[in-house]
Image (tube, coloured by chain):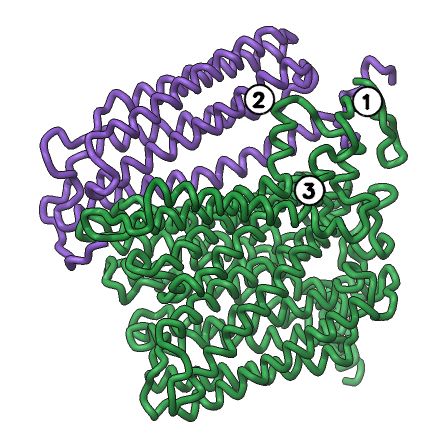
Chain colours: A purple, B green
Amino acid sequence: MSAQTSPALYPTTGEPVAVNARRNRLGLWLCIISDATGVVALLIAYMYLWSLNVNNAWAPKGKNHWALDWPFWAIVAGTVLGTICMWWGVKGIAKGHTGRLMAGALLSSLIILVAFVGQIIQLSTFPFGPGDGAYASATFWLAIGTAIHLSLLTFLTTAIVGRTRAGRITQENHSHARLVAMWMTYVCVAALLGAIFTTVMKESPNSNAPTFGTFQN
Amino acid sequence: MSQTAVIHEQMAVPQPKQHGKPGGFLAHTNIFTGLIGGVVAAGVTYFIGDKLVPWGTQNADFSQVGLNALVFCTFVAWVIGFMAGIGAFAGPIRWALGHDLTHDDAEYMAGKGQGRMKYWKYTTDHKVVGIQYLVMALVLFGFGGFFAMLIRTELGATWREVFDPNFYNSLIGTHGIVMIIAMIIVVAGPLGNFIMPLMIGARDMAFPRLNALSFWLLFAAVPPLVLNLVMGGIRDGWTVYQPLGTQAPIGMIGYQVCIITFAFSTGIAGVNLITTIVTMRARGMTWARTPIFIIGTLAAAIMGLVWFPMFQYAQLLAASDKVIGTSFYIPQSGGSVWLYENLFWLLGHPEVYVIVVPATAGILELMVVFLRKPLFSYKMAVAGFAGVVGISAVVWVHHMYMTGFAPQAGYPFMLSTELISIPFGFLVLVMLGTLWRGKAWNRLPMMAVYAVIFDKIIGGITGVYLSDVPVDQYMHGSMFVVAHFHYMLMGAGLFAAMGVIVYWFPKMTGRMFDERIGKIGFWTAFLAFQVTFLSMFVAGLQGMPRRVLQFDNAFDISNWISTIGAYCIGIGMLIFLYAVITSWRNGKVAPSNPWGAKTLEWQTETPVPLENFPVLPVVTSDPYGYGIPDPYLKVEEELDQDDNETVGAR
């Protein structure tokens, strides 16, 4: 086999990069499953407390107490847009266009950074504090979860820019960029679910709220 | 690509640019830099935090948000500082900068040429990580066992109170969670890391750096847990039901940070184990030729990966209630304690199987070797593991029958809990079937088989009682429950772990285990275990509640017996530990395959070289091809022969 037709090899193990990429892909799927269980735990918490309305204390007291819907959807839109940019770059590098990956990753990184900043602004401008009832608690944590996801994405997309600049991502070996794009797609789904929950489930359907003791923190 | 390296004596591989000396930043880090990093980060965080939110700060409900937030941030800073100090962040930063590892870097990180220092560093070699896990498990058992002795001292001294009640409750909680962590890691940690890659014919785990990360996260998780004892303790049992957890002193935050960190460690380990098993088995090792220990490890890793985040988030939200004043579990503000119990037990019950399944798989593995016959129905064993994984997801509510949560859910969950005894019964049947007509080579590992079968039957059957709603109405919260789960976790889990560790001890340490002393310790502990916990069943049946230090005189005798038994378990375990240490230091040098076993880990030399195998093995037959090809066929042949003889005689 000539040097030109030899598969690219992974430097530390000597395996073809395709073998390594398959392994990494399975690892990523497992990470997604594990992380998704955590997201499901937050969604269960939201839905469970919403449906119970314990002590009639689901909703925060006062007027205009619900969080605005549009910031959730704006952050989801930003995340989706960033993900589309990354996939555009990944499709480009698969055809050998390094510049397209560079542009896609850079754009993605900037958009995700904006979404992250937007998420922080949303967290700091909710019309309630985290201790203002169950709705406030659950909503805060869905937003915190998205913020953590977005901070990780900011690092990952920036890293793809750095690695592309350093020549580590090539047409033959671009699996890391693809993995980041896959992870971003998952984050979009997680953020979308959070937005759906906070938009659709506001007033508790339980008008006959159970009353429990008067324990205070 | 500036250079090439020859890997495994097979081919020249282009290498990325070498930045500095091999290992880079990691060449300068070890556990001591980690400790310095952790202590400095915690100290600085505490100092700055105390300036911003002083200790005495209270919210409108008069809870000490300042103190809780300060302690939480300090513990988190310890974990991050420790991980930074030991070099855990070097990999992601290098990756982001495009400074990929060279082969020399990878070899350095795997511990090449570092002697014993590699055990104190962020070493990626699976064998080093396996030994680190083993030592960590032994240390945790030491802690947990010591607490158990203190608990039994209090319960045995029926005429007086030995400890302050709050301290006693903290002992109970700390003993519980320390032992749970130790049991989760004792098989899947040392053997899942050291033995599993060898057994499937791989050179290392799929993600070596994640392997080191998972161990050192575990290491970082322990100090916050232990420190709880001087910070008011965990007074609410290892389950830390709400709202007790929210009302608890600041020691509870140590528990919460420990669990949150440990769950990361477990998740990462799960990803690594599953990926390694699925993608790195040797050529020719089809699923049907995969050793049963690997299948059991895979099953445990799947359960841990999927369910541990539930436990993690249960604690995360509990910490949030304490630290930033949310109200997930505070009914006054719309929270629900049942939410906690659901999230907790969604992991809490599968976690029992995360402990017992790899231990059982290890026992099946060594039965084959010491009986020199194939596993009785490999497929039934695999079905058993698959059934346990599947059904374990739908049994958690049996821990909540008496909490008032959804009483109508009791009967469906009673049914599902009883159903899980079927796949578990498969595993016991496979054990008994493999024993049937076998001529046992009665070495110490084989003795663990007898012990485990005995304990598992008692633990399993009492578990079926407890899964029944009517029985549970009487038994829940009693010493009967305590005895039951000790039979499963310690009787079936720990004694199995002792057997499999002795079995693989020669491969892991290069020394033969001193079975003479080991047997004395093992049987002392086993017999004392029966004395302790059979007596505890009696106390439970008489109505003695758990987690109390004052009780009626009617329970005195069973408690005296249990305490004497517990001390004897302690003596047995110390003897066993003595055998472990002396064998490791001065034991007879082990040959490569002292048991004449057929699985791949025994086919490489001892001590195992850095890259495990000079050439990757190819599997051409099943791992259990000892003597009789199939016990069914043998029996049928014998029956046919008997029939023929009978006919001939007529």
What's the amino acid at mark 1? Pro
Disc 2 target residue? A159
Give the distance between the C-alpha atoms of the residues marked 1 and 2, in whole angstroms.
23 Å
Considering the numbered disc 1 on the image, is that residue within a helix, a strand or a loop? Answer: strand
Separation of disc 3 and disc 2 at Cα? 24 Å
The mark nearer the N terminus, 1 or 3, is 1
Q: Chain of mark 3?
A: B
* Quadrant location of the N terminus of chain B in the rendered image: top right
The x, y position of residue B92, in whole percent, is 61, 31
Q: Which mark is residue B29?
A: 3
B581 lies above or below B525: above
Q: Amino acid at mark 3?
A: Thr
Checking the image for residue B14, the label placed there is 1
User: In which quarter of the view is residue A57 placed?
Assistant: top left
Instruction: Give the class, few, some or many, for how many residues have Cα within 10 Å of label 3's Cα (few <14, many ≥20).
Output: some
| Label 2: chain letter | A
Tell me the mark number nearer the camera, choosing from 1 and 2.
Answer: 2
**Residue B450 as seen in the image, left or right of residue B22:** left
Question: Which quarter shows the C terminus of chain B?
Answer: bottom right
